Image (cartoon, rainbow, N blue to C red):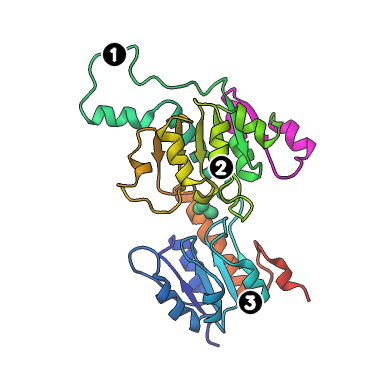
Amino acid sequence: MSKPRVLVTRRIPEAGLKAVQDCADVEVWEGEGPIPHDVLLQKIASVEGLYCLLTDVVDEALLAQAPRLRVVSTMAVGYDHIDVHACTRRKIPVGNTPGVLTETTADCAFALLMAAARRISEAAEFVKAGCWGAWDPTLLVGHDVHGATLGIIGFGRIGQAVARRATGFGMRVLVNHSRPIADDILSQSHVEQVSFDQVVAESDFLSVHVPLTPETQHLIDRQVFNRMKPTAILINTARGKVVDSEALLDALRDRTIAYAALDVTDPEPLSAQDPLVMLPNCLIVPHIASASVATRTKMAVMAAENLRAGLAGQPLPHCVNPEVFEK
Ligand code: DGY
């Protein structure tokens, strides 16, 4: 019996690719960078499975070209690049990769927090530029992490993992979440659940951990920056569009806030000439929060497992629209 056809939109970790090849006849986009959208539109017509990345837009127009498509599996926890409602209308299950990247992403959020607080990237540039002279009591002084207040917006898996790190550093942790947080989670985490306004106003570090939805787009806007401390540092490892980029640029330029450390931006990628990249008080890394060898391998395999289940007509282990399986 012939295997179903699957398009994998980028080179992925070997273990994930092998798992897809075991159950499908696979075409991998081998080009540099994301698959161009017109190529995706053309290739989608002949496949039963799509193994995609967060750089691929899966929308109504794409699905209209995909008469054979039975499953969409993204190698990401965030699925804002997929029109899930459009997939659901067509009874196409959508898989994602929750859980496996939680701790790795929290590590990166905390690394950004610490690098921003202690001006690590500026300090490294300083040495590379040959500027290191004698020890100087005023050189590259930053801010303490221990004893400071961390605000976490969005207390899901990743927000909670960041809080665990922060309590280990003796930080006071304020959290804001869209729903009441269960008492046992609150007491185990040693955090206080507070209003959005309070977390914004009282935080020395504000770390964003919400998914991108119509409600969270530009959640961190000009008004929010105006209510933050002038010494505050913003950390974003969620999605670039959660922050209003223009407002952030202004807030950093006029020192409404002190610093931003970003794993995600709007748009992505940013050019080296982007005004945000050129600011001295903005540290930007290229969407690498989940980028450890172990975690990317787990994500690749998990996405393959979702794909395999979908091709077999079975419920996906991690499905964002499980209602497609209801009779
Ligand atoms: C995700 O999975 O959504 C991250 O942004 C990339 O790991």
Is disc 2 surrounded by few (<14), some (14 to 19) or many (20+) residues within 10 Å?
A: some
**Which element carries disc 1, helix, strand or loop?**
loop
Kindly give the residue lying farthest to the bottom in the view shown: 1
Observer-nearest of 309 and 233 = 233
**Which element carries disc 2, helix, strand or loop?**
loop
Taking 1 as reference, is 143 above or below it?
A: above
- What residue is shown with label 3? 312
The residue depicted at 46 percent of the width and 61 percent of the height is 55
- What residue is shown with label 1? 135
Mark 3 vs mark 1, CA separation in Å: 65 Å
Is disc 3 surrounded by few (<14), some (14 to 19) or many (20+) residues within 10 Å?
A: few
Region rendered in magenta: 163-189
Taking 264 as reference, is 233 above or below it?
A: above
Mark 1 vs mark 2, CA separation in Å: 39 Å
Give the label, 1 or 2, closer to the camera: 2
Q: Residue 150, position in %: x, y?
A: 59, 29
Is there a contact, CB below 8 Å, between mark 3 and mark 1? no
